[in-house]
Image (cartoon, rainbow, N blue to C red):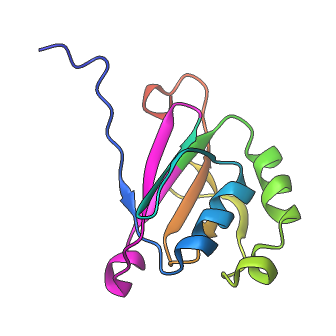
Amino acid sequence: MNTSNELARPFLPAKDFGLSKRFYEALGFAKVLDSDEVVIFRIGASSFLLQRHYQKEWAENFMMQLMVDDLDAWWTHISSLDLPGTFGVPAPKAPALQPWGLRIAYVVDPAGVLWHVAQRRPNVDHDQ
């Protein structure tokens, strides 16, 4: 079995489907499919399905990691969006080096999903 072309895509919850769609578009994710029940968003080689489904306990315990080449540029972009004022989410947390070695900024989406926007480290295979 050849698994080189396989793709795993998580399903993310949306408490307010329209608001979540606008949130991800503002962050820079591209919509590759937009239907009444799901939206497929892509950034780089990664993608996920935003679904018209919400369960508070699940949403607030769900995390995603986005590995980026330039966290400072991402932070400038994230900071420019006024996410709390525009989307009613908690204020993003500025990049900081974590004890496990990654420099990370934190962003919470409108459903409560926590995103770790992490600086990719050179020559670390599992960051690629």
Left-right relation of 68 to 112: right
Residue 9 location in percent, x, y?
Answer: 36, 45
Q: Quadrant of residue 27?
A: bottom right
Instruction: Let me know if residue 42 appears in the view.
Output: yes
The answer to whether 39 appears left or right of 54 in the picture is right
Identify the residue shown where x is 47% and y is 42%: 47
**Is residue 100 at least partly visible in the picture?**
no
Tell me what residue is drawn at x 47 percent, y 73 percent: 14
Q: Position of residue 68 (x, y in %)?
A: 64, 39
Residue shown at the point (41%, 71%) measured from the top left: 52
Q: Does 58 appear in magenta?
A: yes
Part of the protein shown in magenta = 44-65
Image height of 77 relative to 71, above or below: below
Residue 6: image x %, image y %? 28, 26
Q: Quadrant of the N terminus?
A: top left
Side of 83 relative to 45 (left or right): right
Nearest the camera: 88 or 104? 88
Please say if 32 is above or below 7: below
35 inside magenta stretch: no
